[in-house]
Image (tube, helix red, strand yellow):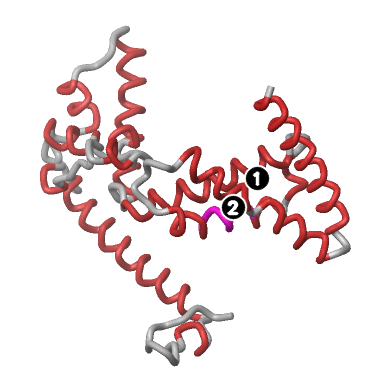
Amino acid sequence: MATNERRGAAGRDSDDLTDLLERGKADENAREEALRRATPWIHEVIAESFAHSGYGANELFRPGYLGLLSAVCNFELARGRPFREYAGNLIRGEIRQHIRDREQPLRVPPWMNDLNRQIETAEARLLRETGRLPTLVELADAVNISEEGVVEIFKAREALSYVSLDAEQRANDPAPTIRTELIRSKRPVAFPIEHRIRIASALERLAELQQYLFRHLFETPTDTAPDQAGGAPRPAG
């Protein structure tokens, strides 16, 4: 009985917020009031979904608030769903991303994804031609990469690079290390795979430098101004 009452109250609360958000299109005060009323949902999401994440509620509140703010500012994208459900999904999404970013899962360079796609294409072709799934040796022959290299490329697949949201489970995540020096052409060719990897890696480092410059191009002095009290940088605004 109590559960049904809570669900009914949550539904009414969601409807009330939707009314506020509708008015908030022209009234900033209404939007701010909707945000204020919905803020406790962040604590509920953290308690229900991230209690065992290994991260404190205070740390997770910030990304959760960004998710709620995004939901409030884009409430029309709920597309008929209850606003509380829609906002909860965005809150969870931001918190999940925060945890995964902090845990720094395996960073896969774009060229490694390209090699995995080549292997997938070769697998499909060999299945059509032979009527059976190919062996590791057959796949390696098809893409002209050493068997050891194909094994290393497999480590870059998403199934092996996930980050668990539960701290205890995260201790047992695969966390593979890719040995790119093992990715070599199986048969001699004019432009072997190891040479292409070196060029791709160099271009990637150049792209990272370009991204760094873009990120800092429009910084103002206040973006990195030292805090008067402690000397630490403080965000703008």
Residue 78: x and y, percent? 73, 41
Q: Who comes first in sequence, dot 1 or dot 2? A: 2
Q: Residue at 56% of width from left, 44% of height from top?
A: 44
Could you tell me which quadrant the N terminus lies in?
top right
Is 31 within the magenta?
no
Residue 139, image x and y in percent? 22, 25
Q: Is there a contact, CB below 8 Å, between mark 1 and mark 2?
A: yes
**Which residue was labeled with disc 1?**
87
Q: Which residue is mark 2?
A: 67
Stretch of the chain drawn in magenta: 63-68
Residue drawn at (47%, 73%) of the image: 215
- Secondary structure beneath dot 2 equals helix
Q: Amino acid at mark 1?
A: Ala
**Residue 211's image quarter?**
bottom left
Crowding near the residue tagged with mark 1, few <14, some 14–19, many ≥20 C-alpha atoms within 10 Å: many
Q: Amino acid at mark 2?
A: Gly
